[in-house]
């Protein structure tokens, strides 16, 4: 099999990673893998099994039975399954955001999901985003980006997304606190924490539009 084009993106919650990655995948005509959705599905499985996502022994006891799968639909969109059940629509809740961050604390969980992600990268030209893609899943790709923005701006974007989905009732400060808590969990874990890879290009999107971010990424990829 030929070497595939793998583009790796990491960064904190709400920085615009998935928006940029999706648009970039479309422009380049390649696939997009949202690895956060796999951690979210793992957290959903844990909760359904009655295991707290932060409990290492509990997670170890259910890991073999966790059948997280990713499939691509004809329109190129990614769906996540637990066994045969399509759980894609259930994953974007605040409970599963923190649950995903907590299941990601445990080395065996990360190893299982990273292994699956590497296999997808060997099969397809793909853009992956997450928290350990540049540092752990695809460390050998030359295309590495760390996308970030100020915590205020990230909270504003998250709140806007929620409002667009018709979810009202949260105020900016609450969203900002949730994001800061999750950042601390993702950056502070002992095993494979979120960090900036030495050879990653850092993109601060605080004052950039989504389109400017994609234009910048395309230019950088052409240069690399
Ligand atoms: O990208 P997201 O917000 O859907 O990710 C949810 C959580 O999953 C994130 O806070 C930490 C965890 N995660 C991870 O540990 N490693 C990844 N590669 C992707 C997500």
Image (cartoon, grey):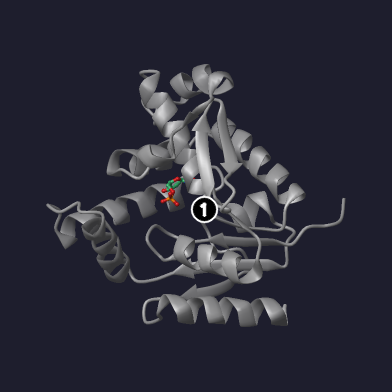
Say which of 163 and 176 sits in front. Answer: 163
Q: Is residue 64 left or right of residue 82?
A: right
**Mark 1, residue position:** 131
Identify the residue at image location x=15%, y=54%: 168
Q: Is residue 105 left or right of residue 161?
A: right
Identify the residue at image location x=72%, y=67%: 142
**Total count of labels:** 1
Q: Position of residue 69 (x, y in %)?
A: 58, 34
Identify the residue at image location x=42%, y=25%: 46
Q: Position of residue 78 (x, y in %)?
A: 54, 47
Q: Position of residue 190 (x, y in %)?
A: 51, 43
Q: Is residue 82 above or below residue 171?
A: above
Q: Is residue 111 above or below residue 188?
A: above
Q: Position of residue 36 (x, y in %)?
A: 48, 47
Mark 1 CB within 8 Å of ligand 1: yes
Q: Is residue 53 above or below residue 175?
A: above
CA neighbours of label 1 inside 10 A, class few (<14), some (14 to 19), many (20+): many
Say which of 108 and 42 sits in front. Answer: 42
Identify the residue at image location x=47%, y=24%: 59
Residue extending farthest to the right is 1
- Mark 1 lies on a secondary structure that is loop
């Amino acid at each position: 099999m030929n070497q595939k084009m793998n583009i790796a993106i990491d960064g904190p919650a709400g920085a615009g990673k998935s928006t940029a990655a999706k648009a970039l995948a479309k422009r380049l005509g390649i696939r997009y893998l949202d690895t956060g959705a796999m951690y979210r599905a793992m957290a959903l499985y844990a909760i359904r099994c009655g295991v707290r996502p932060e409990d290492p022994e509990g997670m170890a006891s259910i890991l073999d039975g966790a059948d997280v799968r990713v499939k691509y639909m004809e329109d190129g969109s990614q769906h996540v399954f637990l066994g045969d059940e399509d759980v894609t629509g259930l994953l974007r809740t605040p409970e599963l955001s923190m649950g995903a961050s907590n299941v990601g604390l445990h080395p065996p969980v990360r190893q299982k999901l990273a292994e699956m992600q590497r296999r997808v990268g060997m099969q397809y030209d793909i853009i992956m985003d997450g928290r350990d893609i540049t540092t752990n899943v695809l460390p050998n790709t030359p295309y590495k980006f760390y996308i970030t923005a100020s915590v205020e701006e990230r909270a504003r974007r998250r709140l806007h997304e929620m409002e667009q989905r018709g979810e009202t009732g949260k105020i900016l400060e609450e969203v900002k606190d949730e994001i800061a808590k999750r950042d601390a969990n993702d950056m502070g874990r002992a095993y494979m924490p979120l960090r900036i890879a030495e050879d990653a290009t850092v993109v601060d999107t605080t004052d950039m539009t989504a389109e400017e971010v994609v234009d910048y990424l395309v230019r950088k990829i052409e240069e690399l």
